[in-house]
């Protein structure tokens, strides 16, 4: 049985808040179930790791709860958020531009290694 869930947010478009709820909520639930959970934000989703972006987004129009609130809830439950290193260049970010909940910057090799070499990891991608 796997004890780690790796959620890859690559095709999730931050400009469409409705797409952001499921992966972050499922990460929170998995962490509450005591699984180790990592969310890798890459490609367009990497914008979510930049300060100020997730704070300005909502999952449901009219909601007071921002996407950043969902990220904080997930982080509080034990979810680790990772930013893919090419996003720093792609979105003109440095380490200081990342939200505090982003615990690490990883490269493509990290993702491939997790998927191919770790037997106790299950992967969901969005």
Image (cartoon, grey):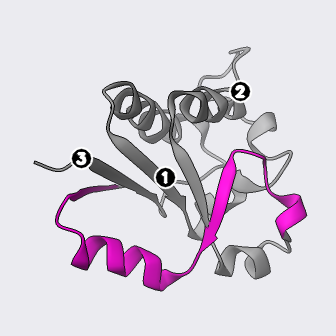
Question: In terms of secondary structure, where does tag 3 sit?
Answer: loop
Residue wearing tag 2: 66
Tell me which corner region of the image, top left, top right, bottom left or bottom right, holds residue 70: top right
Question: In terms of secondary structure, where does tag 2 sit?
Answer: loop
Q: Residue at x 23, y 78 (%)?
A: 116
Residue wearing tag 1: 39
Q: Residue at x 87, y 60 (%)?
A: 97
Q: Which badge, 2 or 3, comes first in the chain's sequence?
A: 3
Toward the left, the furthest residue is: 1
The residue stretch that appears in magenta: 95-124
Number of other residues with Cα within 10 Å of mark 1, as a class: few under 14, some 14 to 19, many 20 or more? many
Q: Residue at x 84, y 70 (%)?
A: 93
Residue 89 in view, yes or no: yes
Number of other residues with Cα within 10 Å of mark 2, as a class: few under 14, some 14 to 19, many 20 or more? some
Q: Residue at x 43, y 41 (%)?
A: 23
Q: Which badge, 3 or 1, comes first in the chain's sequence?
A: 3
Q: Is residue 17 left or right of residue 79?
A: right
Q: Which mark is residue 3?
A: 3
Question: In terms of secondary structure, where does tag 1 sit?
Answer: strand
Q: Which badge, 2 or 1, comes first in the chain's sequence?
A: 1
């Amino acid at each position: 049985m796997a004890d780690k869930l790796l959620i890859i947010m690559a095709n999730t478009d931050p400009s469409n808040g409705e797409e952001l709820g499921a992966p972050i909520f499922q990460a929170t639930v998995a962490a509450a179930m005591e699984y180790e959970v990592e969310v890798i934000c890459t490609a367009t989703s990497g914008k979510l790791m930049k300060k100020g972006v997730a704070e300005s987004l909502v999952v449901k129009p009219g909601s007071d709860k921002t996407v950043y609130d969902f990220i904080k809830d997930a982080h509080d439950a034990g979810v680790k958020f990772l930013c893919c290193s090419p996003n720093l260049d792609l979105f003109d970010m440095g380490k200081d531009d990342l939200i505090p909940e982003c615990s690490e910057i990883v490269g493509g090799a990290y993702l491939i290694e997790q998927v191919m070499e770790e037997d106790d990891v299950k992967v969901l991608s969005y």
